[in-house]
Structure formats: structure tokens, C-alpha cells
Image: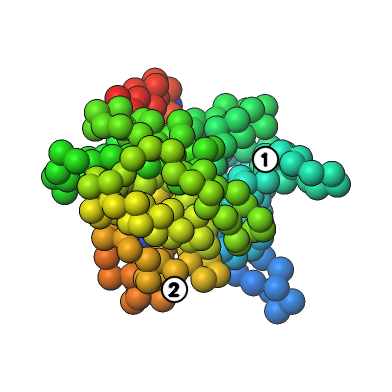
Amino acid sequence: MNSLKIFSGNSNLPLATKITEYLGTRLGQGRITLFPDGEIQVKVDEDVRGGDVFVIQSTCSPVNHHLMELLIFIDCLRRASAARITAVLPYFGYARQDRKDEGRVPITAKLVANLLTTAGVDRVLTLDLHAAQIQGFFDIPVDHLLAEPVISYHLKELDLNGSLMLVSPDVGNVKRARAYAQRFNVDLAIIDKRRVSGSDIVIENIIGNVKDKTVLMVDDLISTGGTICNAANLCMDRGAKAVYVAATHPVLCGPAVERLASAPIKSLIVTDTIPLSSRAKEELTGIDVLTVSELLGEAIRRIHRNESVSSLFITG
């Protein structure tokens, strides 16, 4: 079996360290530096010839910089004769640009898939894609894991009362919300929203009765916070007792921190696929950050040993 090598770009160093601790190994030695004009240079400081190499890098803000880091890292490893290269993307940026919803726009998620493949990736391991069909943009194996078991375990420890109700903040998120509803054996309500721009949405209605319920809203990511905060306000206006929010990826850009800090959200639960900004750590006092290191670490172990990863997909 080829030796296991794990490297990390700059976006996920804390998570990568936890993954290597779980696996009982160490993080590979590499350097990412900038030329004076801003060009990225990568240097791997150990032998990877014939190795089974995993590169951990979320393409989060600054998105384009981290994406280029990843592509250059992959090219470096390919030219250093790594036997197999797996890109581990805890958060896959550009995932929301997965279709042509109007004329003369790109499908950038497909472009990113092509870039990764061209750079030399042999397979991809990722978590909670914004749209599951993005797996089909790749012509190489993709292992798409869900953070639902990690988040659900934490929610069970909170011991929420019997009046719990799942709420999907939009129609497109119903399948994800239903998985949580089935896990907790509770009813599901749906927020009817309409997006008017990249940062603004209009809440039309809520399908379901949340009066006297403890509401749990789940989503794959929180970007500007408009959807979640408006939905939380609507639920409280309709008589909900409390609102809990769980999201895998804390993108938290633009006015997100300000909106979340003032929203009627009792607890915000996210994972460490994206590091929290210093502002978010300071101003969001009710936030819990769960680690997905064991989930990703176990997937890496099984991929390296050519074992089945199927059981990690199970949410029930």
C-alpha cells in the first residue's frame, strides 16, 4: 500500500491538524509563499513519490486565492510523482453557480470541477455540497459526505423538548431538512422565499404551523444571513417558542454577523469546514462550532485502505 500523506492549504490548517491527530499521523511539510507581485508559489518539503496524497483546502474567502492555492498544490504533487491525489474540500466554493438560471451566465461549479481534474486530481472528498448534482460535474470519483450525523449528535445532547419542529428556510433545502426531521421523528415546515438579489430575499409565507414549537432550521451554509434571519423572525412572529439554527458552512460574509447578532436565534450551530472570522467569534456569543475532523478523517482512512465509505453516507 502506498504511504499516506496529508497536506493542507492555508484555509484549513486547524481542521487538517485535527484530522491528522485522529489518524495518528502528521501533517505533510509544505510551504505556500507569495512573490512580490502576488503570484502563489508552492514547495513540498518531503518525498511524495508513489504516495497516496490528500490535500485539504476549503475554497472559502478569499475564494479565488484559496482555489489557486489548491490548484497549484495539486500540480506540484503531480509533478512530484504522487501515485494518487485526493482533493479534500470541506467547503466547495462556487457551488451555488451550478446552472444557467438566466441568459448569458456561466456554470462556474462545472468550471471549477474541470480545473481540479485538469490540475491532476484523481478523486474528490467533500462535505454538504450546495447542490448534490455537482458530483456529476466530475468525471472522477467523488465522495460526498453529510455533516448531519455530527450536528444531530450535538442536538440530541441539547435535549430539546418534545415540541421540536424542523423548518426548511427555503424550498430547495427540503431534502436536507427532511433528513433531520426523520432523525428526530418530528414534523417539517417550509419557508416560501423569493430571492431578489445575491444578498436580499423576500419571505412570502411559511407552510406549516410553528405556534408553540421549538424551531430548528437547518441549511448547508449561511452566507449573508438574510434567509436565516428573516425566516427566524417569521417563525417568532408566528408564535414559535425559540429558534435554533444549524448550518454546515459558516461563510458569514457581508452583513451576516450583524444580522445574526440581532436575530431572535437562541443558538447557532456550525462546523469547522470554514474557520470563523475574528469578528464572528467576538460578536456571536451563542454560536457552537462542531468539528468534522473525525468524519473526514475516517473517510480518508477508508479511501486510503480501499475500503467502503458507504456507511459514512447513512443519515438514519
Q: Is residue 203 visible?
A: yes
Residue extending farthest bottom? 36
Three-letter code, disc 1: Asp
Percent x, y of residue 54 = 49, 42
Query: Horizontal and vertical percent for residue 152?
Result: 26, 39
Q: Nearer the viewer, residue 176 or 58?
A: 176
Query: Where residue 258 is drawn, which disc sits there?
Result: 2
Determine contact: label 1, label 2, CB under 8 Å. no
Can residue 51 be seen in this snapshot? Answer: no
Label 1: few (<14), some (14–19) or many (≥20) C-alpha neighbours in 10 Å? some
**312 lies left or right of 186:** right
Toward which corner of the image does residue 155 lie, by quadrant?
top left
Label at residue 9: none
SS of the residue under disc 2 = helix
Residue 178, how many percent across, how many down?
38, 31
**Vertically, is 223 above or below 166?**
below
The residue closer to the viewer here, 254 or 8, is 254
State the image coordinates of residue 99 (x, y, percent, origin top left): 71, 38
| Quadrant holding the C terminus | top left
- Quarter the N terminus occupies: top left
Which residue is painted at 60% across and 69% down in the image? 33
Residue type at numbered disc 2: Glu
Residue 59 placement: quadrant: bottom right
Q: CA distance from mark 1 to mark 2?
A: 28 Å
Q: Indicate left or right for 152 with 271 as reference.
A: left
Counting residues from the start of the chain, the first of labels 1 and 2 encountered is 1
**Which residue was labeled with disc 1?**
98
Task: Work out whether residue 170 or residue 99 is closer to the camera in this orientation and state it.
Answer: 170
